Each structure stands twice: as structure tokens, then as C-alpha cells.
């Protein structure tokens, strides 16, 4: 199953596959896939967009903010959730790319909103090639890239 096929919010089969992948990865790293961690993943998978901790807690009344924050920390350190700093008071969180598929972000510097964007394959290949060329000139070995565009959203 490809990463892109997992990025279907609300699809129970894909959510089940995400849970299996996360459980296996946590186990390999010596962590348990607790009910609280599963709830966080459910909220983020169903949202389909980056969320702040207050938004995550508001989406599931059974989540306690302090426990949610500790669980997010474990999931971020395990490479399963990505933390996105957009300025402002709160970081945003989303499922990591191996689970969601490769994408980039539009980040509003006024309201802190984040929108996922997908480049067409031709543009993505050009970006990859340009970044690889720059990396090879400096002896850098790239693993992946992310492109976040900072500016003002249509509402701001």
C-alpha cells in the first residue's frame, strides 16, 4: 500500500492500516500504542489537516491536554507525527509523511493557519532535482525535503 493511498480521511480501511503501521513502529522503538495515542491519531487522521493541541483536545473531549501533549511528544520523537511551527502561540501537528504522503504547506503568518498543498509530479521532480544538485555541490546527503510557503491567507 502506498503512502498516498493512506491519506483518505474517514476511510476505515485506511485508518486501520495507519493504526497497524503506527503500532508496529512504536513497538520496534519500545513504546506502547496506548488508547490516548490511538485517539490522537484518530483525531489527526480524521481532520486531514494540521491541528494545534487545543484543536485536537476540542475535537475529542476524552483527551486530557497534559496527556495529549506527552503522547504527541512520543509520537513526534518516533517520527509518526510532524510538528509544524507556524509562529504564534501553538505549534500544529499532523501525521508524518510516511502515513499521509508527500506534501507541502501554505502557512499564514497573520492567523497561523496551515493548508496542505500537493505539487504536480513534474514540479515535484524539478524541486527534487534542484535540491539534489545543490546538495551534491556542498557534499550534503538529503533524505527528504519539505517546502513551506509563508505569507497571508485569503482571509487575512
Image: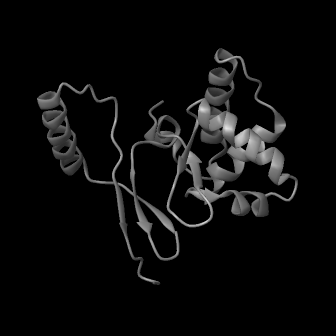
Residue at the limit of the structure toward the bottom, as seen here: 155
116 lies above or below 72:
below
Q: How many numbered marks, from 0 up?
A: 0
The foreground one among 134 and 5 is: 134
In the rendered image, the vertical position of residue 134 relative to residue 57, given as above or below: above
Q: How is the image coloured?
A: one colour
Frontmost residue, 25 versus 88: 88
Q: Quadrant of residue 72?
A: top right
Q: Is residue 131 left or right of residue 97?
A: left
| Image position of 139 with respect to 14: above or below | above
Q: State the residue in front, 94 or 150.
A: 150
| Position in image of residue 148 (x %, y %) | 37, 56
Q: Quadrant of the C terminus?
A: bottom left
Q: Position of residue 44 (x, y in %)?
A: 64, 51
* The quarter of the displayed image where residue 132 is located: top left
Counting from the top left corner in percent of width and height, residue 67 is at 82, 44
Residue 78 appears left or right of 65: left
Q: In the image, what residue occupies the spot 62% across and 49% down?
A: 45
Residue depicted at x 77% and y 24%? 32
Front-lying residue, 17 or 95: 95
| Residue drawn 48% across the image and 30% down it | 1
In the figure, is residue 31 to the left or right of 50? Answer: right
**Residue under the point 26% across and 25% down:** 141
Estimate the x, y position of residue 8 in percent, counting from the top left. Answer: 54, 49
Amino acid at each position: 500500500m502506498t503512502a498516498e493511498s493512506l491519506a483518505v480521511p474517514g476511510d476505515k480501511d485506511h485508518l486501520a492500516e495507519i493504526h497497524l503501521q503506527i503500532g508496529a513502529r512504536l513497538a520496534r522503538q519500545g513504546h506502547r500504542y496506548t488508547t490516548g495515542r490511538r485517539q490522537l491519531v484518530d483525531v489527526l487522521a480524521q481532520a486531514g489537516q494540521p491541528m494545534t493541541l487545543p484543536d485536537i483536545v476540542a475535537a475529542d473531549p476524552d483527551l486530557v491536554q497534559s496527556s495529549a501533549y506527552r503522547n504527541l511528544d512520543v509520537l513526534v520523537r518516533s517520527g509518526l507525527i510532524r510538528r509544524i511551527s507556524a509562529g504564534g502561540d501553538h505549534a500544529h501537528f499532523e501525521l508524518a509523511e510516511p502515513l499521509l504522503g508527500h506534501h507541502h504547506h501554505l502557512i499564514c503568518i497573520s492567523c497561523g493557519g496551515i493548508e496542505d498543498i500537493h505539487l504536480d509530479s513534474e514540479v515535484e521532480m524539478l524541486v527534487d532535482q534542484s535540491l539534489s544538485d545543490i546538495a551534491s555541490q556542498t557534499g550534503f546527503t538529503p533524505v527528504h525535503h519539505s517546502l513551506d510557503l509563508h505569507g497571508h491567507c485569503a482571509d487575512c
